[in-house]
Image: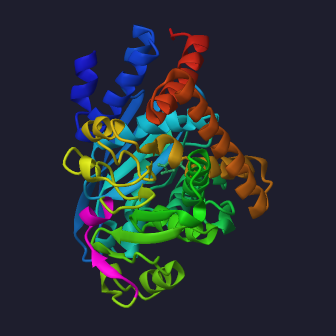
C-alpha cells in the first residue's frame, strides 16, 4: 500500500507532502491503519479537455481534481492553471488543504484541481471554453456539499464565475456555493481577494510580537507579486513594516531604505512595467538574491520548492513566512531547523484564503452577506487563534511550528475518522 500510493502520485511535491506527514504521524504515534488511509487521496479524477482554439484547431489539455479527504466535511481547495501542473502535484496540494482546513477549524476536507496550461498563452475565449469543459467533466464530483473549488495560481474570479455558471446551467438554477472566490455580483465575498495576503500579515504580526521585534524595525522581502505577494506587500507596508525587496519570476527590486509599494504596484499592475526596470525606485535583484536578502521577515509567495539544500544555509531572515504552498524542501527544512529562524508553515500562514472562502460559502448558502469589516475581524480571530494554538503546542511538545501545525491538523482529521469508523 505504502509503495502503491507513492507510485501512483509520484512527484517531488507529493513526496514532500507525504514525508512531512510521515514525520508528524511518527511523532504523534498515529495508528498504522489510519496512517495508511490518510497517505493516499480518497478520490482522484483525471480528465482530458478538448478545446476549440481561435484558429479552428482542437487542442487537448489535461485536467485533474483530487479529493484528499472529506471526513470533516465537503472537500475544499483551489484550481491551478500552470504549465507544470500534474496529478502528483495536485495530490500533494490536496493533502495540504486537508491539514489547512483542519488547523483553522473549518468544517471541510481538502482537495485541489489543476489544468496543465499556460493561461497567458490563451485568449479569453479559449480560457472560457477550457474552463467550462473542465467544469463539465468534473461536474459529477463537485457541488456545495461535495467539493468546492476556488482560485489558485493562474485562476481568478472570472474563472470561478465560468465554473459557477457551467455548474448552475447543468442543474438548472444558480448555485453560488459551488465555488468560492467569485465576483461580488454573483455571490462573492467582500475581502476574499486579499484574504490570503491579509492572513499572512496577521500571523507575521503575531510572530513579531512573540519574538518582541518592533514593527518599525522590521524589514521584509517578498518573493512573488501575484495575488498573494501583492496584497501581502500592500497590507504589511500599510501596517508599518519596511519592504526592502520584492520579485516576480523575471527578477526583482531592492532598496535598503524601503520600497515605495503603492507606486510599484501601480506601475506593475496598471502600467505593466517589469519590477527590475523601475530603476528610480530601487536596484534590480535576482530571485536567488531575494531569497538570501538580509531581512527580518522573508515571505516566499510564489511556487513550491524555492528554499532548497542549495540556498538554505544562506537564508538570512529571523522569520520565514510560507505564503506559498510547499516553498521549503525537506532537506532545507532540516538545515533551517538548526538555525534561529522562526518558521510559520504554509498550512497555517496562507490559510487566510480558505478561511474567507469558508465565509463566502456560508454567506452563499444562507443568502445573507456580511460587511467587509466583519470579514477582516473574523479572519483575524480564526487565524490568530490557530497561530496561538500552534505556538502553544510547539512549545509544549518542544517541536517546530511545522510539526505542531501538522500534528494539530492530522489529529483533528484522525478524530473524525475514528468517530465515523471504516465503511463498510
Ligand atoms: N488556493 C488557496 C489555497 O491554496 C485557497 C483555497 C480555497 O479557498 O479553497 O489555500
71 up-or-down from 362: above or below: above
Q: Position of residue 178 (x, y in %)?
A: 59, 49
Query: Given the current orientation, which residue lies at the most extreme bottom position?
Result: 280
Q: Is residue 286 magenta?
A: yes
240 up-or-down from 379: above or below: below
| 237 relative to 219 in the view: left or right | right
| 116 relative to 100 in the view: left or right | left
Q: Position of residue 68 (x, y in %)?
A: 44, 32
Residue at (78, 53) in percent of width and height: 367
Nearest to the observer: residue 70 or residue 324:
324
Nearest to the observer: residue 387 or residue 167:
387
Q: Is residue 172 magenta?
A: no
Q: Name the colouring of the figure.
A: rainbow
Q: Position of residue 109 (x, y in %)?
A: 54, 33
| 62 relative to 209 in the view: left or right | left
Which image quadrant is residue 234 in? bottom right
Nearest to the observer: residue 279 or residue 172:
279
Residue 182 in view (yes/no)? no
341 up-or-down from 419: above or below: below
Residue 141 in view (yes/no)? yes
Which image quadrant is residue 236 in? bottom right
Nearest to the observer: residue 70 or residue 223:
223
Residue at (48, 79) in percent of width and height: 265
Magenta span: 281-291
Q: Position of residue 1 (x, y in %)?
A: 28, 15
How many marks can you see?
Answer: 0
Amino acid at each position: 500500500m505504502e509503495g502503491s500510493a507513492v507510485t501512483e502520485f509520484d512527484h517531488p511535491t507529493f513526496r514532500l507532502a507525504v514525508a512531512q506527514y510521515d514525520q508528524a504521524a511518527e511523532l504523534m504515534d498515529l495508528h498504522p491503519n489510519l496512517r495508511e488511509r490518510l497517505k493516499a487521496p480518497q478520490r482522484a479524477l483525471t480528465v482530458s479537455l478538448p478545446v476549440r482554439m481561435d484558429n479552428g484547431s482542437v487542442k487537448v489539455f489535461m485536467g485533474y481534481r483530487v479529493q484528499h479527504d472529506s471526513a470533516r466535511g465537503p472537500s475544499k481547495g483551489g484550481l491551478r492553471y500552470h504549465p507544470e501542473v500534474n496529478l502528483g502535484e495536485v495530490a500533494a496540494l490536496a493533502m495540504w488543504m486537508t491539514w489547512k482546513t483542519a488547523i483553522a477549524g473549518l468544517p471541510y476536507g481538502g482537495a485541489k484541481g489543476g489544468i496543465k496550461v499556460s493561461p497567458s498563452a490563451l485568449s479569453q475565449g479559449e480560457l472560457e471554453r477550457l474552463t467550462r469543459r473542465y467544469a463539465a467533466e468534473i461536474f459529477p464530483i463537485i457541488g456545495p456539499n461535495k467539493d468546492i473549488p476556488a482560485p489558485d495560481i493562474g485562476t481568478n474570479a472570472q474563472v470561478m464565475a465560468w465554473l459557477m455558471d457551467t455548474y448552475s446551467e447543468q442543474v438548472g438554477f444558480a448555485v453560488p456555493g459551488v465555488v468560492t472566490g467569485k465576483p461580488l455580483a454573483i455571490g462573492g465575498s467582500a475581502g476574499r481577494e486579499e484574504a490570503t495576503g491579509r492572513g499572512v500579515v496577521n500571523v507575521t504580526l503575531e510572530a513579531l510580537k512573540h519574538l518582541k521585534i518592533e514593527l518599525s524595525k522590521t524589514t521584509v522581502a517578498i518573493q512573488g507579486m501575484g495575488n498573494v505577494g501583492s496584497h501581502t506587500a500592500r497590507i504589511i507596508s500599510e501596517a508599518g513594516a519596511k519592504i526592502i525587496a520584492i520579485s516576480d519570476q523575471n527578477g526583482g527590486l531592492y532598496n535598503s531604505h524601503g520600497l515605495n509599494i503603492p507606486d510599484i504596484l501601480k506601475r506593475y499592475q496598471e502600467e505593466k512595467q517589469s519590477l527590475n526596470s523601475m530603476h528610480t525606485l530601487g536596484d534590480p535583484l535576482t530571485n536567488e538574491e531575494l531569497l538570501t536578502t538580509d531581512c527580518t521577515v522573508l515571505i516566499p509567495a510564489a511556487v513550491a520548492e524555492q528554499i532548497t539544500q542549495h540556498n538554505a544555509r544562506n537564508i538570512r531572515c529571523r522569520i520565514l513566512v510560507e505564503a506559498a504552498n510547499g516553498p521549503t524542501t525537506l532537506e532545507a527544512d532540516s538545515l533551517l531547523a538548526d538555525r534561529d529562524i522562526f518558521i510559520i508553515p504554509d498550512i497555517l500562514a496562507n490559510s487566510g484564503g480558505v478561511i474567507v472562502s469558508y465565509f463566502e460559502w456560508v454567506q452563499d448558502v444562507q443568502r445573507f452577506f456580511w460587511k467587509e469589516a466583519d470579514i477582516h475581524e473574523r479572519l483575524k480571530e480564526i487565524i490568530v487563534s490557530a497561530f496561538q494554538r500552534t505556538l502553544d503546542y510547539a512549545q509544549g511538545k518542544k517541536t517546530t511550528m511545522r510539526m505542531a501545525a501538522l500534528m494539530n491538523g492530522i489529529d483533528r482529521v484522525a478524530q473524525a475518522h475514528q468517530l465515523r469508523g471504516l465503511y463498510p
